[in-house]
Image (spheres, rainbow, N blue to C red):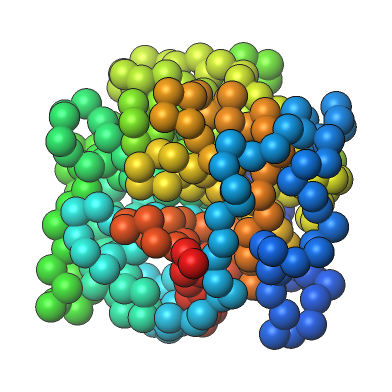
Amino acid sequence: MKRLLLGLALALACGGDDDVEVDAGWPEDAAVDAGSDAGFDAGVDGGSDAGVDGGPPLLACPSFAEAVQTGQTPVEATDALREISGVAASRRNRGVLWVHNDSGDRPRVSAITPAGVRAAVFELEGADAVDWEDVAVGPGPTEGTSYLYLADVGDNLMLRPTVQVYRVPEPEVDSSTTAPRTTLSGVERLELDYPDGAHNCETVLVDPRNGDLYLVTKSADGVSPVFRAAAPLAAGSTIVLERVAELTFGTAPLIGNPETTGGDLTPTGDGLAIRSYTHAYFWWVGASESIAAALLRAPCPIPLHPERQGEALGFAAEGDGYYTISEGQPEPIWFYARE
């Protein structure tokens, strides 16, 4: 009976934000311009409420073009992608984006092209899917091998004693086939424990320089502690996370919706982006600098096209821009080119 009650509670916890439409407060075709007067000045001291030091960025803020639609998410009755919650560019397969559904789906990840053509579906052997919220690509136990990290970290009611991230070597995708279904073996389960109790989370970052894993938590009041699991990440035992930073969204300098929904590190690890439903921000990361230290500086606002319920952001494998996608079916796939 206890297991049944916990299962029901988890189902409620994971499904609480389904089908929520967010009004960005912008015209239909408007986009946030990183160089415009968006209510943020990189030199403004955010103060304690911002959770950042407020000093200037490490370098001049990068410039990204306004969103261009590269395609739309597939419309299929089978293996439908109705609630894409994470996106990451493949390092092994040129022109492939990894995406997955939010809660309520099986433990599977899809390979799609930027045009929205689905090339493959992989089901993770031995994995569970309580509330998958993000995906990242990064290094792992075997040097020179690129790994997928699927983050089962959603917890709207904050009831889960631990959360999980599944790690598996990136599979090869044959883009000439039409969405073959394959079981993916060799999946490792990373059990993660917050040091201060349960948190909701929708953002996972994996540092390409050293394999450290970061969770950026999500909160209705905008206070988002950042936690780290330092590499090497051992499967088979519980990893206690370390709280390394805190950000506050919804107030200057991180204006906009207070709830974080996704993010990514650049392929070289020299920068990172975190998004909410309405805004996105970028931080430079110095060559020998920790992610926590980088987050102490004031962020750079970057463009984010209005989306119905945008939860996914991932940098292109070449580092020449980033993609965003909203939940829904079909939804545009947006690309923001580096200028």
Q: Residue at x 68, y 20 (%)?
A: 197
Let me know if residue 128 appears in the view.
no
Q: Quadrant of residue 288?
A: top left
Let me know if residue 238 appears in the view.
yes
Q: Quadrant of the N terminus?
A: top right
Q: Is residue 141 left or right of residue 259?
A: left
x and y, in percent, of residue 323 in the image: 47, 65
Relative to 60, is 291 above or below? above
Q: Quadrant of residue 158?
A: top right
Q: Residue at x 40, y 39 (%)?
A: 269
x and y, in percent, of residue 270 in the image: 44, 40
Relative to 65, is 257 above or below? above
Q: Residue at x 61, y 20 (%)?
A: 244
- Please state the total of marks drawn on the protein image: 0
Relative to 314, is 146 above or below? above
Relative to 89, is 306 above or below? below
Residue lying at the far front in this picture: please name it. 60
Q: Is residue 139 left or right of residue 260?
A: left
x and y, in percent, of residue 34 in the image: 67, 62
Residue nearest the viewer, comparing 112 with 162: 112
x and y, in percent, of residue 106 in the image: 40, 55
Q: Is residue 131 left or right of residue 111?
A: right
